[in-house]
Amino acid sequence: MQNYGEDDYLVFDCPGQIELYNHLSVFKTFVDYLKQDGWSVCVVYCLDAHFITDVSKFIAGAMQALSAMVKLELPHVNVLTKMDICESKAEVEEFLFPEPRILLDRLSASTGPRFAALNVAIGQMLEEFSLVSFVPLDINDEESMEEVLHNLDNAIQYGEDEEVKVRDMEGGPGAMGDGDDDIGED
């Protein structure tokens, strides 16, 4: 990892087995090592867009994301992937910033009264933490990829320590008040 510079992103693609994050400390140990070595670390949790076709699948995915957030204790960006194959992007909007009460109503309608108490508990937990939101990723849309990168930069505060660049206001190219502009004159 010594061959990488300050502006490089390293991506560690981890298996989608949530047990590895919840029950074992190997990933927490790994990210702690990276942080001690001076790396800015951010978790990117990817959930496929097909999870929005069934509210119970989406809630399960949102709870997995929440579990990873709590266990790893790192800046976190949740990404809703495969938007390029999603039929209706308009339907996705309500899942980007999920409203637990609406999800709970849908879940209760699909599971029936037998699971009412469990559904309420799940809804309360998602609402109480209120941490889970998603950034859509369409690999065919450059703006979508830029938005994901922007969220990552914000999460790790990339560029926060850079010097502020001040434009020369007195003279030089692009300077204001150099007398070349005849604003307001006829």
Image: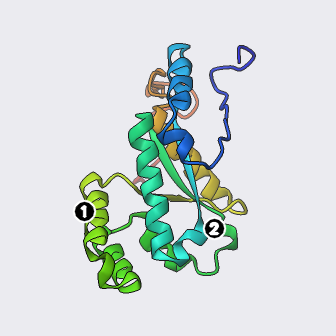
Rendered location of residue 114, percent (x, y): 31, 80
- Residue 2: horizontal and vertical position, in percent? 71, 13
Q: CA distance from mark 1 to mark 2?
A: 28 Å
Rendered position, 141 above or below 170:
below
Give the tally of numbered discs.
2
Asked if the residue under mark 2 is in contact with the one under mark 1, i.e. CB atoms within 8 Å, the reply is no
- Give SS at disc 2: helix
Query: In the rendered image, which residue does mark 1 sit on?
Result: 124
**Viewer-side residue, 60 vs 32:** 60
Type of the residue with mark 1? Gln
Q: Is residue 32 above or below residue 16?
A: above
Q: In which quadrant of the rendered image does the N terminus lie? A: top right
Q: Residues within 10 Å of mark 1 (few under 14, many from 20)?
A: some
Residue type at numbered disc 2: Met
User: Which percent across, then down, holds residue 55?
Assistant: 45, 75
Q: Which residue sits at x=35%, y=85%?
A: 112
Name the outermost residue toward the right: 3
> Would you identify the image quadrant in which residue 75 lies?
top left
Q: Is residue 82 left or right of residue 136?
A: right
Instruction: Name the image quarter holding residue 176.
Output: top left
**Of the numbered discs in the image, which one, if any, rests on residue 83?**
2
Residue 94 placed where, x, y %? 42, 73
Determine whether 125 is above or below 18 in the image.
below
**Residue drawn at (52%, 34%) of the image:** 24
